[in-house]
Image (spheres, rainbow, N blue to C red):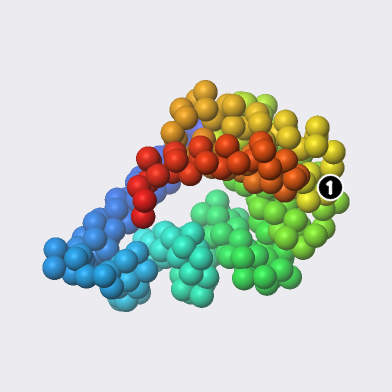
Amino acid sequence: MASTIFAVGQARARAEAERQAQISQAVADFLKNDVLASVGPAKAKSPEVNVRYILDTASGNIEEKFEHAPLVEASIRQTLGNTYLSLGEYKAAEPHLERARQIRREQLGEEHPDTLTSMNNLGWLYMCQDRYDEAEQLLVRTLETRRRVLGEEHRDTLTSMNDLGWLYIREGRYDEAEPLLVKTLEIRRRVLGEEHAETLRSMNSLGKLYFWEDRPDDEIEPLYVKALEISRRVHGEDDVRTLYYMNALAALYKGLGRYDEAEPLLVKALDGYRRVLGEA
């Protein structure tokens, strides 16, 4: 009996892995053949062609093209929605993220990890749009479900804890944000390690919260300094992640009125960004 249950579990895991691989390949093909191919050599030289133009062009025929492959449509919409979100194009992101959530909920169920990812991303979008009540409903429900289905220490659960903490920060609910961010950092340190990228982001997030709470400098500064030191050691001086933490520490010093310490870091970060990313 036990061997039969184990075999069934393995078969389901293999089927899920194959499904995910097929969807990933379909998304990659779409990005290559539809998104990038929509900008030929002649169009590429036009000043009107930018990331937003390419995304808008790609968004035009998704529903028709993937009428019989809804989960592929959902993954593509998730990708496009997250890209719009990263560009600050919240209005353009919304229909993609909402449709991705709707499809996944219908096809996979409310508690599937992909559905929960769509819910969490949509909650983050609502937060960015200052729709705090709607954001909280989604982020709380996602966190509760991930805790129950995936466990407290799963990376997706930790993402939910972090994102709900940020929502509370945005609303000035620092007392509710702090235990979430403290716990996220503690688990990430233990499970992922001190040098993991998500652990460094947690250090930075908690440092920002402590600054807004007007905590003593000796509670705030070590979090920023440590994140920068680790990033320098792991990624190198000119890595964009190191430059981000360098700029964050400089911004902290500026916020604390320690301008003599802020200026050289800001100059160094700017020089680094110019070397890595160019003047534009």
Residue 131 is situated, as x and y percent measured from the top left of the image, at 68, 72
Q: Is residue 6 above or below residue 251?
A: above
Q: Is residue 67 visible?
A: no
Residue type highlighted by circle 1: Asp
Q: Is residue 217 left or right of residue 140?
A: right
> Callout 1: helix, strand or loop?
loop
Q: Residues within 10 Å of mark 1 (few under 14, many from 20)?
A: few
Q: Where in the figure is residue 11, as x and y percent of width and height? A: 42, 39
- The total number of labels drawn is 1
Instruction: Write the residue at 61% across / 61% down.
Output: 124
Write the residue at 18% across / 69% down. 43
Q: Measured from the top left, where is residue 273 in percent x and y?
A: 44, 43
Give the labeled residue for mark 1.
214
Viewer-proximal residue among 100 and 216: 216
Between 261 and 172, the residue placed more toward the observer is 261
Q: Give the left or right position of residue 245, taking residue 205 as reference.
A: left
Residue 14 seen anywhere in this rendered image of the structure: yes
**Quarter in which the C terminus is drawn:** bottom left
Q: Which residue is at the far front? A: 260
Locate residue 37: give its quadrant: bottom left
Left or right of 182? Residue 112 is left
Q: Is residue 120 above or below residue 205?
A: below
Q: Where on the picture, by quarter, is residue 116?
A: bottom right
Choose between 35 and 116: the one closer to the eye: 35
Q: Residue furthest top?
A: 233
Residue at 36% x, 51% y: name it: 279
Could you say where residue 13 lies in the image, as x and y percent from the top left? Answer: 45, 40
Quarter of the figure with the N terminus: top right
